[in-house]
Amino acid sequence: MKSAWDLFKTFFLNYFWVGVCVLLTSIILDLMYPNSCNKIFIVIIKLLDAIGISIVIASIFTFASGTSQFIDKIKELLKDIVVRRDFLANIDTESKREALKSIIQPSSSEKNKYPNIGDYYGYFIDKTLEIKEKSVRSNYSINARAYLCSEKNIIAVEGVYTYRLYPSSSGFNDIVLGFEDEESFCTSVIVSDPNGERKVFEKPNLELYDEGGDISYRANIAIQDFASKKNHIDVELKLTEFGKDHWKLIQFKALQPTDGFRFQLYCENNIIIQEHSIFVVGAKYQLDMNDRKDTISFSCNQWVNEGTGICVLVSIPSGDK
């Protein structure tokens, strides 16, 4: 590798001096004949200026391109473009969509078998790119307890839901909670920011929703004002749901993309788990239930999409009622 002195000598013994001499020549001629009206003479001076400047700039660039730092920088740029393709991460959404469609598309044989297969590929490309428009969650955890409510003499389930929420491209979306019956309720929703500040929403007001006969009671909790400019917030919900007489169907369905999910249920008062179903697509999960069938645990440490959920049917055996 050349020393700094060798590089210095190379720089000042190449065409740099030629360019300086050409510039000086044009300056001297201009000073000697400042009032010349000869157009050819003026053109020659301007041409010498342009040539001199070009030679000086070219020599400086040639010197810079010969340094190891310049070569390493070019190597990194080429790696980003050719190998890692990092430049794709910085293009706009529409350009990403077109790039993905160019890469992920059915082959000619697939199109011959089913002409509309391209719509299938396009659907998942659109779903993937939509994620930036949604608030995503991580480490979603549900700890629930099923017990016999002495006041109503029916099964009740208390649950504590916790997760970390990240903003979409437009900020934080509302927290939506809902129940299928009007007796169930939310005790509180607590949101905390990274600085430890928190805001408590006591007993959110539930409103009736009728979607073509599908009745539910929901509350939308706006958190954008509190969470504005935060990179994430932590959410905790305390819910109580009631069953029907001696049984209760416990249901949960993810409405947002979620990175990691855990569900735990413990039963009291001789309540046992009768049936359970898990709805997960494209992710691995673990399910454990003890021999007494009064404790169940479900966990998934991967991304799960909207629609992922769990159903657990609990009841008091007929002989224990």
Image: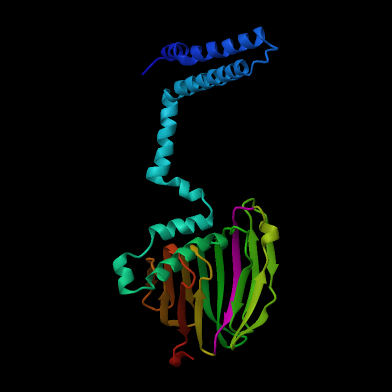
Does the rendering let one see residue 318? yes
Q: Residue sitting at 47 percent across and 86 percent down? A: 315
Give the colour scheme shown: rainbow
Residue 237 among magenta residues: yes
Does the rendering let one see residue 271? no
Q: Quadrant of residue 243?
A: bottom right
The magenta stretch spans which residues?
230-244
Q: Give the farthest residue toward the left.
A: 109
Q: Position of residue 67 (x, y in %)?
A: 43, 23
Q: Quadrant of residue 101?
A: bottom left
Q: Position of residue 184 (x, y in %)?
A: 62, 81
Q: Quadrant of residue 221?
A: bottom right
Q: Is residue 153 left or right of residue 106?
A: right
Q: Residue sitting at 42 percent across and 23 percent down? A: 66
Q: Position of residue 165 (x, y in %)?
A: 57, 60
Residue 241 among magenta residues: yes
**Front residue of this view, candidates 54 and 108:** 54
Is residue 296 depicted above or below 228 in this figure?
below
Secondary structure predominantly adopted by residues drawn in magenta: strand
**Front residue of this view, candidates 178 and 158:** 178
Quarter placement of the N terminus: top left
Is residue 103 depicted above or below 79 in this figure?
below
Q: How many marks?
A: 0
Q: Is residue 141 left or right of residue 26?
A: left
Is residue 256 depicted above or below 207 in this figure?
above
